Amino acid sequence: MIITGFYRWSRRRTAFRNDYCMSCDQQVRADCIRAFVVLHVKRIPLVPLGFWRQWECSQCGRRPSCPRTARTSILTLGAIVFGLFGILLFWVALTFDKVKTAAILAIGTGFCVASAGLSFWCWKRSFAPSYNDRFAAVSRSESMTCPECGAGLTVNPASDTLECESCGIQRI
């Protein structure tokens, strides 16, 4: 088995804003983290991918737009796969003798019941507002101090944003 992943070097906070975290299910402060990302295989860095920016929740550390539950499309795909596998087992059961047929039919019935249960759950599942809808309702950050060093924020005339004098973090 090949173990792959990403190394993130030189992680640095570059900005912060108020955001809605789907994992925490509340309005939080999100930090923009800039890091040099390298793809590794078996702990050997291979491909440098450059500097990437990613928003992270200040409470849980996950991306604010990442939902904490499985998406309905994934559950629907699981229901379809279970249903097809159950039908396949019913079709295979028609070709065997009676002793093996009962066991295969029982397993096929289990897959079909699981498929029906997942389908019903997807149909009855309550749909929460999307991340974009929740983010639109978030109020703008009014903090006048830097979360990194605690210094005051001043207006940068070039970008018309508030910026920390000592560490350069922007309030967005």
Image (cartoon, helix red, strand yellow):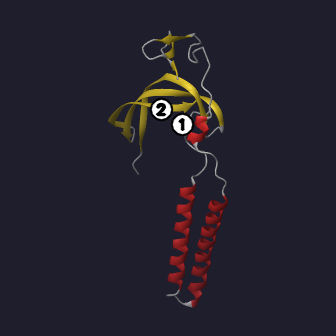
Q: Residue at x 50, y 23 (%)?
A: 13
Outermost residue toward the left? 47
3D distance between C-alphas at marks 1 and 2: 8 Å
Q: Check contact, mark 1 vs mark 2: CB within 8 A.
A: yes
Residue 146 in percent (x, y) is at 57, 15
* Residue 49 to residue 144: above or below: below
Q: Position of residue 123 (x, y in %)?
A: 63, 62
- The quarter of the picture where residue 105 lies is bottom right
Q: For the residue labelled by badge 1, is the local secondary structure a helix, a strand or a loop?
A: loop
Q: Which residue is mark 1?
A: 63
Image quadrant assignment for residue 21: top right
Residue found at the far bottom of this picture:
97
Q: At 37% from the left edge and 39% from the top edge, which residue is drawn?
A: 40
Residue 43 in view, yes or no: yes
How many labels, in total?
2
Identify the amino acid type marked 1: Arg
The numbered dot on residue 97 is none
Q: Earlier in the sequence, mark 1 or mark 2?
A: 2
Does the rendering let one see residue 58?
no
Three-letter code, disc 2: Gln
Residue at 65 percent across and 65 percent down: it is 120
Q: Where does label 2 land, which residue?
A: 54
Give the camera-side residue of 157 and 118: 157
Question: Under tag 2, what secondary structure?
Answer: strand
Q: Label 1 crowding class (10 Å Cα cut-off): few <14, some 14-19, many 20+?
A: some
Q: Quadrant of residue 143?
A: top right
**Residue 77 % position (x, y):** 52, 62
What x and y, as percent, mark residue 32? 50, 27
Q: Nearer the viewer, residue 96 or 52?
A: 52
Query: 38 or 62, which lies in front?
Result: 62
Tell me: 37 left or right of 13. left
